[in-house]
Image (cartoon, rainbow, N blue to C red):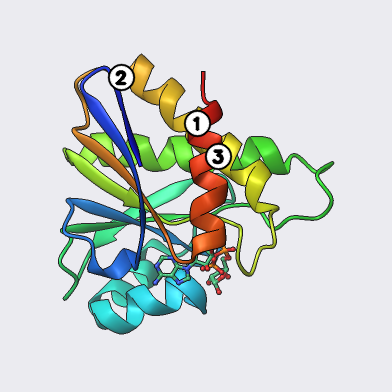
Amino acid sequence: MERTIGTTRLVLVEGDITEQRVDAIVNAANSRLAGGGGVDGAIHRRGGPSIMEECRRIGGCPTGSAVVTGAGNLPARWVVHAVGPVWSGGKRGEDDLLASAWRESLERAREIGARTVAFPSLSTGAYRFPVDRAARIALGTVRDWILEHPDVLDEVRVVLFDRATYDAYAAALADLP
Ligand code: AR6
């Protein structure tokens, strides 16, 4: 499923983030940049040790923010390590922190000159953010950012690992104003 906003394509696909041939892929990292399971584990496993070496030098990244490293052996050129919030009921600023993680990732992509960027579903795995709510926040944030930054990105691809997550993002995209 896809939609064009200005000159930028917003595309949803079911797949694996580590296989995407785009300028930058986004990692669902933790604030220590220490590696882990899920997307983070897959990126470090397939990308090789150079990514963790750079993460160690950077040291960490606050929740709601994002930092950039190279992409090692991955087909992408850069990895944008975004730190989404851990879900703890919705009253601890989780919505704003999730929107911030998406927005900051797009900012990092713009700063490095990326034209194509692929995201996973930040925070909806180990961090347990409800997927329908996350999908609406994520795609609304991407849309607003694209409208504020015309002609910066050619494609924002959201790569969903399973059908249920894809369906949640597809419903959110269909409802997007
Ligand atoms: N490609 C695309 N999506 C994937 C992949 C993949 N290869 N693998 C998993 N997903 P998660 P979070 C989906 O847990 O919730 C780590 O330990 C997954 O099914 O990766 O932000 C970090 O170190 C889910 O839909 O990220 C952090 O400590 C989505 O990606 C913590 O987990 C996000 O799941 C971050 O948790």
Label ID, residue 32: none
In x, y percent, where is residue 40? 44, 72
**The image quarter in which residue 135 lies:** top right
- The secondary element bearing badge 3 is classed as helix
Mark closer to the chain start, 2 or 1: 2
CA–CA distance in space, label 3 to label 1: 5 Å
At label 2, which amino acid type do we have?
His
Residue 171's disc number:
3
* Residue appearing at x 70%, y 52% in the figure: 130
Instruction: State how far apart marks 2 and 1 are (Cα).
Output: 22 Å
Estimate how packed mark 2 is, as few (under 14), some (14 to 19) or many (20 or more) residues with alpha carbons within 10 Å: some
Give, as a three-letter code, the residue at label 1: Ala
Left or right: 117, with 131 as reference point: left
- Who's the residue at 38% across and 62% down the image? 58
Q: Distance between the Cα atoms at labels 3 and 2?
A: 25 Å
Q: Residue at x 84, y 51 (%)?
A: 89
Tell whether label 1 touches label 3 (CB within 8 Å).
yes
Three-letter code for the amino acid on which mark 3 is drawn:
Ala
Image coordinates of residue 44 in percent, x first then y, are 34, 78
- Residue identified by numbered label 1: 174
Q: Secondary structure at mark 2?
A: loop
Mark 1, other Cα within 10 Å: few <14 / some 14–19 / many ≥20: few
**Mark earlier in primary sequence (3, 2):** 2
Relative to 129, say whether 59 is above or below: below
Q: Nearer the viewer, mark 3 or mark 2?
A: 3
